[in-house]
Image (spheres, grey):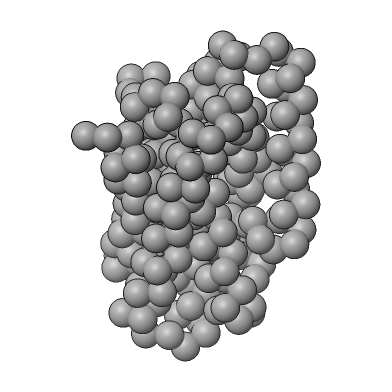
Amino acid sequence: MSIPFIAVGLSLLGGLGGLFVAASVLLVKDNARTKLVPWLVSYAVGALLGVSMLRLLPTALETLAAPQVFATLLAGILLFFVLEKLVLWRHCHIHDCEVHESSAFPVLIGDAFHNFVDGAVVGAAVMTSVPLGISTAVAAAAHEIPQEVGDFAILLHAGYSRGRALFLNVLSSLASAAGAIAAIVAFDTVPMLLPYFLALAAASFLYVAMADLIPGLHRGRTDASSMRQILLIAAGVATMILL
């Protein structure tokens, strides 16, 4: 199978996989969902940290000098901070979303942009190696789950039916395929940019994990759930090691 088909397939796995798991989460009772979402977030944190630190950055360092890689990483973190300020990049959870009163349109536009970037990340990873692409797609799917749960909550709050909310989220998730195609075309034309983009991809995953997801896990008191969070984070890291 050719690289473009693999890239598009894995990008859709990352986007639609997280979406359909999120849709399934919304079918469970509220009490169970309240416990389940933090578990999924914990696993996503481990997957994002693992693929960034153990896969994407080492791959970029194979081509670029360390100062170039870490300068790109720093620039990327600052970029995603700015994008989040512009409400183009956010990670919203069903219980702590600060934009539940927003209209659905900005939410869908932001989600489509997020999926486009994730798809481009997967596409760039596949161009480096298929195993790296698989790891990146799994990490993308893991961190899309809490994002999509939050997006569903916003759309339902805005008055959309479950079926229409799912349909609109599927449409925004398809932007991941466009991102993968754009990455393949861009990096096939200018291959020297690929390692820089891998460092930028690591920045996006690290930013989501450390700025958006981890703070939510620190809320509440320290009890037995804290140990579950640690174990699930470790499981996410282990997944990236094993893939």
Compared to residue 75, the image places residue 118 above or below, namely: below
Q: Is residue 10 left or right of residue 230?
A: left
Q: Residue furthest bottom?
A: 159
Using the image, determine if residue 73 lies above or below residue 175. Answer: above
- Position of 205 compared to 13: left or right? right
> Could one spot residue 93 in this view of the protein?
no
Instruction: Identify the residue at image location x=64%, y=78%.
Output: 102
Q: Quadrant of residue 62?
A: top right
Q: Quadrant of the N terminus?
A: top left
The x and y percentages for residue 202 are 59, 31
Which corner quadrant holds the C terminus?
A: top left
Residue 73 percent location from the top left of the image: 70, 29
**Residue name at image x 43 percent, y 34 percent:** 136
Q: Is residue 104 visible?
A: yes
- Residue 22's place in the image compared with 137, above or below, is below
Residue 132 screen position, x and y as percent: 40, 26
